[in-house]
Image: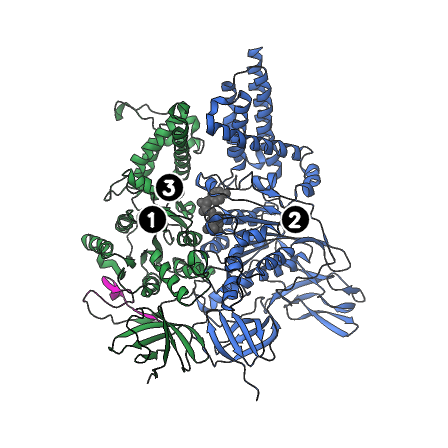
Chain colours: A blue, B green
């Protein structure tokens, strides 16, 4: 006799069901009378272990389980932009309209609006040969984003019908004659979240993602299509940096994944981004942003899914040829969700109880980043940049999640609590952090900004490194033991730290520094250093150099607005004037 | 008629296994009746086939396999709510212990609550004046924030929490407010300190207390904060009150969680705490905030004692990862006699930025705070240097900063337990201390504020103070 599929065990987010002969790995299921959403994560004979994406209280043995015979997928199509979704892409704003301030269970709602009509403008004509990835036409999704409707994967052939006008996402906008018959194409598509979307090929990243954060752009840049991580103890500034990057980075599309973090941080983005304006177009930044919010108190299994939901949507926009950036805050919470489920499956625990496959999963996730040639005949280029916060216990970098991440990503922004206590923000340690994209982006920066960009960067870094060893001496024997030149190095390093690296995320001007401004600021600091060194050689007393009036202007340089960039010429002239007059008096 | 089971098969720590059951739901309440007729309550932690694993809140002492009768109630733990809860004292499971009448509930609410939809939240921005300079000036509390106190054994966190409860107010507003106090495993004396203080000031009328003492059942502590927060949500979001919730001591809560995890033989995480502790704590701490379209708010002040004063211990560590900042108490400051001994440098209020400044506190607030932080940090650094290399190694400026940091601790941080400073007083005190520092070194303050607020201290008398132009 065939057994009905029914629950035999409930343990937190894990449910085991028997009579599941038809079950396939990673298929979605409906669990219990409430029809809670779950995903099959282990199969033993006719028993399937299911991670349930909703709170399981009130669920018990004997209740029915129904498989949907489809893997966990996201809906893709116009209407995603400016949206906010939970970890399995349920629209939180619509849920609120339906059920009020609290999230209740058993709700199913389409992620993409079925009723809204979009103005579809075709870019192909009848008789054209198309294949997967080719652009059929566009709709203006938001004033900032043109949504390109692509031929879905697996379809190749001749356009038989192409429409123009207003359509919902489920109406056919084209018909393609393929080898297996005539296929209707709609704007709405689906894609399983755990599967990487196909590309033609991957290319090495070359162009920096300009974030407007000086310490990042100047010292530890991430490339468009690259990967970066930002580990640090609580309160060291991970979220603030990711928010700043989400707001100001020169990406076309931002996907912000709040993975097991605070509710108010998502609210903050929701309330601020409609007010912040894109520097290029003056449009509200929310028009290019999609949020995935699975906060810490929301179901843990959906948290595990959230980063995949986020990155799949990101790949979809990348396929249109956009520069997409994904931030995941925090990947540690994702890993903990993985650990919790693994523990309940009674898998053999690895380090710190994390499953042995933690490293593989982390690597697979970041591997989905890249600069690529998209599918289609036009060889469109798109990039997907991924940045993840990591929250190690006690800020300890030997944490397995940090270590697994560092093995994969190319940029390491090391946050340090000591800097945060001193209110040196962003609290990114300039000696421990690194970027493996420096060589990649050098050519671009040399061309776009200034040929000596990299040279200045390296001089500044050398000064910071020298300061570190000089501080060691100061701690042992005091400052007097240093030569005037060495003391000048300390002073310049201080200026680099305070007047350049420190950047206030809450100051309306300082929050974002364009590359041109970064270049001028750094140049000023290093010019003062160079000419002061020269003055020392001419025996100008150090005292005099340290109390130059221009230093006050340098300290306020970060507040110079873009339109007043000439101010830097004037500062440079003043440096020259003040130092020359000191040297002349000496001669 | 509720079915009764006599099929307890296994008892370990706080856990009981009941067999041959049917229709049991995950998370529902079980009542176990002992041979003595005593009834204890528990919660279903896991159901496998016909076996149900129950965690008993009141412990398993005296429980027997053969004589225990188990009933499952088909629902989770609920709190009967009504505004009559105000002014009352309950035990850790919500039963009155003040001799007062039974509460006739308006409704019964599951104590686990539901997550607030992030789109329904309103961002907290209203400044709460606690009257404590170290908090108002340096790590400002706002309405709807969750700001824990990281303390240590023997440090005066009860006094600070009681002072906040007494003095907290939003400027220029008279509104309905309430204080909810949840005690988990604290001593009778400590609980009594709060109760007496609430009585003395009359605050008890607007307070609800849930008290689980050190000698009360440990596992009950799992329920206590949830009862308190359910009560808070009711008063805040259904009765429009501004609710301050004090949870003390979260360390005892976490230890109860560890006890259950150990009894279940789960793979332990750091220091034996379960891997899901972050998520579990978040289901408590995230129940603070504001909701769009609702008058009321929930502000949470959880208190925890850091084992060995170690901030990286899993309890403070995971708490800090969830809450919106932390107030850290320092033993060295306490030894120096500074009350409140708040170590402002590692303390943090993440919601400060939107709660201060023009129209909220005062325009110069942000700059003054940054400057005080910078000067105090510098002063402490100078003092450390002096310890290694001797006073002589310090420059004149270093010495000035060292002096500044002493005065900052003695005059700014230190204040009386009954002293309620207005935000103006706090900021003016900050400016007064900043006169010690050369103006050219006040890099973090805008010139306009320096012109407006910096008054040179005159050694003679207030009247002869030179006027700035
Ligand atoms: N760039 C910055 N400018 C000014 N203040 C900052 C900056 N970065 C961080 N801060 C301060 O530090 C606080 C903590 O930052 P943030 O919330 O980003 O920490 P976090 O590393 O994400 O912590 P957690 O791991 O607990 O989420 C902020 O609320 C803010 O006060
Ligand atoms: Mg954060």
Foreground: A141 or B370?
B370
| Magenta-drawn segment | B74-99
Q: Is mark 3 within 8 Å of ligand 1?
A: no
**Which is more foreground, mark 2 or mark 1?**
1
- Contact, CB < 8 Å: mark 2 with mark 1? no
Few, some or many residues within 10 Å of mark 2 (<14, 14–19, 20+): many
- The residue where tag 3 is placed is B344
Foreground: A200 or B69?
B69
**Horizontal and vertical percent for residue A233?**
47, 48
Magenta stretch holds residue B84: yes
**Horizontal and vertical percent for residue B375?**
40, 33
Q: Please tell me whether mark 3 sits on a helix, a strand or a loop.
A: loop
Few, some or many residues within 10 Å of mark 1 (<14, 14–19, 20+): many
Give the farthest residue toward the top.
A587
Q: Residue at position x 59%, y 23% from top?
A: A573
Q: Which mark is residue A224?
A: 2
- The residue where tag 1 is placed is B151
Look at the picture and state if B332 lies above or below B467: below
The span from disc 3 to disc 2 (Cα, nearest Å) is 39 Å
The span from disc 3 to disc 1 (Cα, nearest Å) is 13 Å
């Amino acid at each position: 006799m065939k057994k009905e599929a029914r629950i035999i065990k409930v343990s937190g987010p894990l449910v085991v069901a028997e009579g599941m002969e038809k079950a396939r790995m990673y298929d979605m299921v409906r669990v219990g009378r409430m029809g809670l959403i779950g995903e099959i994560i282990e199969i033993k004979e006719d028993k399937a272990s299911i991670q349930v994406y909703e709170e399981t209280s009130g669920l018990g043995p004997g209740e029915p389980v129904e498989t949907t015979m489809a893997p966990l997928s996201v809906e893709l199509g116009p209407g995603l932009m400016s949206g906010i979704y939970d970890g399995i892409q349920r629209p939180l704003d619509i849920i609120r309209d339906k059920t009020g301030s609290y999230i209740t269970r058993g709700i199913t709602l389409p992620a993409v609006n079925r009723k809204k009509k979009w103005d579809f403008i075709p870019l192909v004509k009848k008789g054209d040969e198309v294949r997967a990835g080719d652009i059929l036409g566009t709709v203006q999704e938001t004033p900032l984003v043109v949504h390109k409707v692509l031929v879905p994967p697996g379809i190749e052939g001749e356009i038989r019908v192409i429409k123009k006008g207003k359509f919902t996402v489920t109406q056919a906008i084209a018909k393609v004659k393929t080898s297996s018959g005539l296929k209707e194409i709609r704007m709405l598509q689906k894609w399983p979240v755990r599967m990487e979307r196909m590309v033609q090929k991957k290319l090495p990243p070359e162009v920096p993602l300009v974030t407007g954060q000086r310490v990042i752009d100047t010292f530890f840049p991430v490339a468009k299509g690259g990967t970066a991580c930002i580990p640090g103890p609580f309160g060291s500034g991970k979220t603030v940096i990711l928010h700043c990057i989400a707001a100001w980075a020169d990406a076309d599309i931002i996907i912000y994944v709040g993975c097991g973090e605070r509710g108010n941080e998502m609210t903050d983005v929701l309330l601020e981004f409609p007010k912040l304006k894109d520097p290029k177009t003056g449009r509200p930044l929310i028009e290019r942003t999609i949020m995935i919010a699975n906060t810490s108190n929301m179901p843990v299994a959906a948290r595990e899914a959230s980063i995949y939901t986020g990155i799949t949507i990101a790949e979809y926009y990348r396929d249109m040829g956009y520069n997409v950036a994904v931030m995941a805050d925090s990947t540690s919470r994702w890993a903990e969700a993985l650990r919790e489920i693994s523990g309940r499956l009674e898998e053999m625990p690895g380090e710190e109880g994390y499953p042995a496959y933690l490293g593989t999963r982390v690597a697979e996730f970041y591997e989905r980043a890249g600069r690529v040639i998209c599918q289609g005949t036009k060889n469109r280029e798109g990039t997907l940049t991924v940045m993840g916060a990591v929250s190690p216990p006690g800020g300890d970098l030997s944490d397995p999640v940090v270590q697994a991440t560092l093995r994969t990503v190319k940029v390491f922004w090391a946050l340090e609590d000591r800097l945060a206590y001193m209110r040196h923000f962003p609290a990114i340690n300039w000696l421990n952090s690194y970027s493996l994209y420096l060589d990649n982006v050098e050519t671009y920066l040399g061309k776009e900004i200034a040929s000596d960009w990299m040279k200045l960067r390296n001089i500044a870094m050398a000064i910071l490194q020298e300061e570190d060893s000089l501080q060691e001496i100061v701690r042992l024997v005091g400052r007097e033991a240093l030569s005037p030149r060495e003391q000048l190095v300390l002073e310049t390093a201080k200026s680099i730290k305070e007047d350049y690296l420190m950047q206030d995320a809450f100051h309306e001007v300082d929050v974002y520094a364009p590359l041109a401004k970064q270049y001028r600021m750094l140049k000023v600091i290093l010019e003062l250093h160079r000419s002061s060194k020269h003055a020392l050689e001419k025996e100008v007393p150090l005292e005099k150099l340290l109390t130059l009036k221009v230093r006050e202007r340098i300290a306020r340089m970060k507040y110079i607005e873009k339109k007043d960039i000439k101010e830097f010429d004037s500062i440079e002239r003043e440096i020259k004037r003040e130092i020359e007059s000191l040297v002349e008096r000496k001669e | 008629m509720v079915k009764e089971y006599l099929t307890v098969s296994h008892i370990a720590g706080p856990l009981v296994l009941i067999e041959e059951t049917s229709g049991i739901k995950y998370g529902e309440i079980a009542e176990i009746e002992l041979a003595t007729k005593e009834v204890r309550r528990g919660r279903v932690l896991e159901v496998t086939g016909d076996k149900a694993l129950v965690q008993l809140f009141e412990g398993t002492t005296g429980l027997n396999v053969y004589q225990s009768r188990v009933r499952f109630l088909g629902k989770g733990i609920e709190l009967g709510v009504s505004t009559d809860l105000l002014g009352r004292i309950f035990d850790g499971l919500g039963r009155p212990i003040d001799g007062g009448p039974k509460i006739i509930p308006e409704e019964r609410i599951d104590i686990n609550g539901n997550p607030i939809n992030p789109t329904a939240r309103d961002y907290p921005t209203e400044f709460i004046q606690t009257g404590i300079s170290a908090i108002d000036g340096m790590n400002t509390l706002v309405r709807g924030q969750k700001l824990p106190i990281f303390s240590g054994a023997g440090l005066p966190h009860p006094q600070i929490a009681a002072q906040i409860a007494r003095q907290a107010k939003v400027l220029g507003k008279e509104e309905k407010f309430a204080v909810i106090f949840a005690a988990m495993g604290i001593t009778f004396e400590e609980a009594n300190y709060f109760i007496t203080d609430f009585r003395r000031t009359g605050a008890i009328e607007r307070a609800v207390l849930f008290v689980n003492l050190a000698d009360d059942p440990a596992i009950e502590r799992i329920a206590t904060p949830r009862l308190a927060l359910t009560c808070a949500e009711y008063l805040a979001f259904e009765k429009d009150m501004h609710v301050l919730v004090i949870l003390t001591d979260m360390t005892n809560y976490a230890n109860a969680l560890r006890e259950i995890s150990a009894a279940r033989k789960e793979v332990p995480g750091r220091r034996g705490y379960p891997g899901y502790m972050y998520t579990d704590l978040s289901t408590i701490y995230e129940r603070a905030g504001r909701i769009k379209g609702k008058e009321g708010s929930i502000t949470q002040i959880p208190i925890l004692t850091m084992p060995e004063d170690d901030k990286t211990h899993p309890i403070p560590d995971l708490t800090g990862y969830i809450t919106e900042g932390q107030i850290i108490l320092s033993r060295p400051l306490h030894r120096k006699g500074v009350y409140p001994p708040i170590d402002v440098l590692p303390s943090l209020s993440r919601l400060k930025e939107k709660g201060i400044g023009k129209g909220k506190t005062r325009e110069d607030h942000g700059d003054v705070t940054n400057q005080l932080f910078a000067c105090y940090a510098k002063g402490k650094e100078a003092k450390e240097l002096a310890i290694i290399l001797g006073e002589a190694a310090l420059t004149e400026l270093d010495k000035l900063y060292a002096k500044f940091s002493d005065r900052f601790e003695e005059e700014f941080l230190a204040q009386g337990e009954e002293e309620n400073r207005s935000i103006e007083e706090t900021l003016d005190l900050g400016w007064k201390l900043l006169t010690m520092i050369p103006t050219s070194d006040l890099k973090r303050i805008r010139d306009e504020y320096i012109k407006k607020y910096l008054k040179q201290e005159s050694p003679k008398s207030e009247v002869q103070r030179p006027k700035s132009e």
